[in-house]
Image: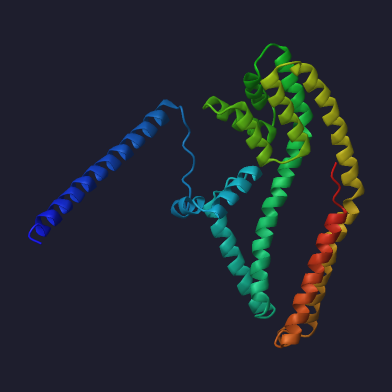
Amino acid sequence: MDNLAPLTLGVTLLCCVLGVMGLHAYTSGRAQREALIDRLSSAGQIEMGPQRRFRGLDRRLRRTELGRRIELKLAATGLDVTPGEYFLYVVAGAAALWLIAASVLASFFGPLAGLAGIWGANTFLNWHRAKRTEAFISQLPEISRVLANATQAGLSLRTSIAMAADELDAPAGDELRTVADQLGVGRTLDDALDELATRLPSRELVVLVATLILSNRAGGQVVSSLRNLTITLEERKETRREVRTQLSQITATAYAVPGIGVGAMLLINSILPGALDRMTGTFLGQTAVVVSLGLYTVGFIAIRRISKIDI
């Protein structure tokens, strides 16, 4: 009991010393980082981008599973938006839709509109990702042709990828530039190409990545493999275009069916003001609205599934 006071004093002094040392290490590291950024910026080696907003929220969100999923989707879309900015915009948009639907239609439609806003934001990312993937797939024959020519000229596969990144337009040029930068900092070719196939999933890209990886591992006729792959990709590109043209009417029907239902509901509310409010004021009316919206959703998904053909 007599030694408790000196022990407490010693532990307190030790904690103070460790705290001062930690604070000194943090401040010195931060100063070195800022000095390095200033030196590289003045030398023109790096380009400072615009100051991002909501950096604190973005850092905390990236540590979560949701943030990592959002970051992966945003990287695939190529949008200049951070996960924190996207999350805040989605929350604000869902809240705005909630208030608008509750004030214009009925209070029952507020939560439904908020959920529809969140679903729409996720659908927008998926649509933008699919659009970018389609654009990348359409450039795959040109990518294969450039890599084949560069390899035939005696360049290594890493150099060929960097050269293709400089010659091709977006999105192929941007994605190959990302792969070249990863190879430049020491990542293996297998990991860099696998990450590319994960960002832009497609059968054609998987075939190209597998061809490049196998050729890099086992050697062999890289040029002939790439030239044969170029012909195959050209044929698949034409087939995909024909199938998409044939299914355009079904795709339009899938979006028209739920649009007609929502339009009819708004038309009834405009003819009989307050009709939706009175209808959703009872449990039976709320059940009818939920069931009808569910049926429209099932019809939309069913039509999209029927019109989806994997090539």
For the residue pair 57 and 47, the one nearer the viewer reads as 57
In the image as oriented, which residue stretches furthest toward the right? Answer: 246
Q: Position of residue 186 (x, y in %)?
A: 53, 26
Looking at the rendering, in which quadrant would you find the C terminus?
A: top right
Against 298, residue 145 (above or below) is above
Residue at the image point whose x is 87% and y is 40% from the top: 241
Q: Position of residue 157 (x, y in %)?
A: 66, 20
For this view, does 18 lie left or right of residue 133? left
In the image as oriented, which residue stretches furthest toward the left? Answer: 2
Against 291, residue 158 (above or below) is above
In the image as oriented, which residue stretches furthest toward the top? Answer: 154
Quadrant in the rendering for residue 240: top right
Q: Position of residue 290 (x, y in %)?
A: 75, 76
Residue at the image point whose x is 63% and y is 48% from the top: 73
For this view, does 239 lie left or right of residue 91? right
> Does any portion of residue 259 appear in the rendered image?
no
Quadrant in the rendering for residue 122: bottom right
For this view, does 296 lie left or right of residue 180? right
- Image coloring type: rainbow
Residue at the image point whose x is 49% and y is 39% from the top: 49
Quadrant in the rendering for residue 230: top right
Looking at the rendering, in which quadrant would you find the N terminus?
A: bottom left
